[in-house]
Amino acid sequence: MASSVETEAQEKNTAPPKESPMEMLFNIDSLTGGQMPMELVKHITFIAGLILIYIYYTMLAEGRMHQIVTTKQELEEIRADYTTQKADYMKVGKQSYLAIAMRRYGLEVSLTPPIKVVADPVKE
């Protein structure tokens, strides 16, 4: 009898193990009866796959957006270079700049204007 009293006292003293906060928040044993049904596992796997596909395509889209932004920046740089070079060429093409460039070769600007030659129409 003494041994049965000791075992009963030990059973009363041992408390059930404490649950972690995660087990307390996500305890679905009351819903599933302590076992995980395969239909639920299939649904969870399918939804997890869809989430992974969504994440993949989101990352792909963000990469494309980054490429578009960098390409636009490069285009703006090229456009600025083009307008600068075009302005330089237009400036060099002026007569005053051409006169300076011609002096290097020993040529001078003509001070007499060109003469217009007019031919008489032939009468037949």
Image: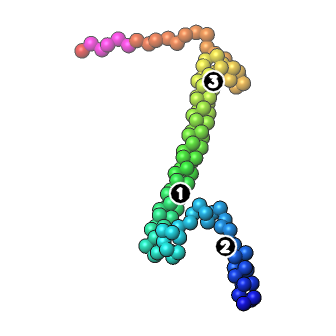
Element under disc 3: helix
Q: Which residue is mark 1?
A: 55
Mark 3 sits on what residue? 92
Few, some or many residues within 10 Å of mark 1 (<14, 14–19, 20+) = few
Q: Amino acid at mark 2?
A: Pro
- Residue sitting at x 31%, y 13%: 121
Q: Are marks 3 and 2 in contact (CB under 8 Å)?
A: no
Q: Which residue shows up at 62% across the image and 29% down it?
A: 84
Query: Which residues are the magenta region?
Result: 119-123
Q: Going 44% across and 13% down the picture, which residue do you hit? A: 117
Residue hosting label 2: 16
Residue 1 horizontal side relative to residue 51, left or right: right
Residue type at numbered disc 3: Val
Q: Would you place residue 56 above or below residue 118 in this image?
A: below
Q: Position of residue 111 (x, y in %)?
A: 61, 10
Point out the image quarter for the N terminus. bottom right
Q: Counting residues from the N terminus, which is met first, the one under dot 1 or under dot 3?
A: 1
